[in-house]
Amino acid sequence: MDRVLKALGAAHEGSVGVLLADGSEPGPVYFDVGSGSDMPSSREWHCYDGRFGRPRAAVLRGSCSCGWRGMAEYPLDWTTLPDDKPLYEADVDLSGPIADYDAHLSVIRDAAVQLPAELTALLTELVHRLDGLAAEEPLVALKALADLRHVISRTGEDAAYELAAADVPIAQVATALGTSEAAARSYLGSYLHP
């Protein structure tokens, strides 16, 4: 998962999704663990194996927490899959749904604002230097990070106020950052209301 996307609210967490034979996307599978108020659940693809009254997946597809669903469907051949074992123990090829999700992430990254090459190089060098300092001179690294936090806070506040003054739509900000509108709103808010 791209660290920047993750830091901006995990708006694009990928998974292998499933569809049932009727074409519907099932809700979570609940696990009966006995008495108690907590009923664990999951949406992992391998939980839809038809065992213990669970729904049985008919096809797999790429899926993202932003709501995107892959158009390509990868049928499960239940004539070759075991009925009495967990689906995750079967040799199921997940490369198609994963590749589709990766393509979705590429579209998100391509739509995001691209940093100038010299800024990318500067940031790469900064990370390299800070990593070295963390190992060799941890107090210097921490002092540099404390100073960097101040710079980030001040510059982030200035940028957020400029966007607000220009009345830039939150949808445009979200696309530029490669995240959801809710995550973008929260991100801007973290600079405006620290």
Image (cartoon, rainbow, N blue to C red):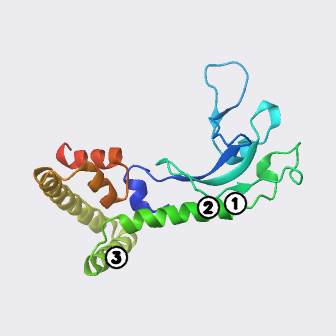
Which residue does the image show at 24% across and 66% down from the upper left?
Answer: 144
Assign a secondary structure to mark 2: helix
Q: Which residue is mark 3?
A: 124
Mark 3 vs mark 2: which is more N-terminal? 2
Residue 48 horizontal side relative to residue 42, left or right: right
Assign a secondary structure to mark 1: loop
Query: Are the residues at dot 1 and dot 3 in contact (C-beta closer than 8 Å)?
Result: no
Image quadrant where residue 140 sits: bottom left
Assign a secondary structure to mark 3: helix
Image quadrant where residue 108 sits: bottom left
Q: Position of residue 166 (x, y in %)?
A: 12, 54
Q: Which residue is mark 1?
A: 94
Between the C-alphas of marks 1 and 2, the distance is 6 Å
Q: Which residue is mark 2?
A: 98
Image quadrant where residue 134 sits: bottom left
Closer to the camera in the image, 192 or 124: 192
Mark 1 vs mark 3: which is more N-terminal? 1
Residue 37 horizontal side relative to residue 9, left or right: right
Which residue does the image show at 39% across and 68% down from the upper left?
Answer: 110
Identify residue type, mark 2.
Ile
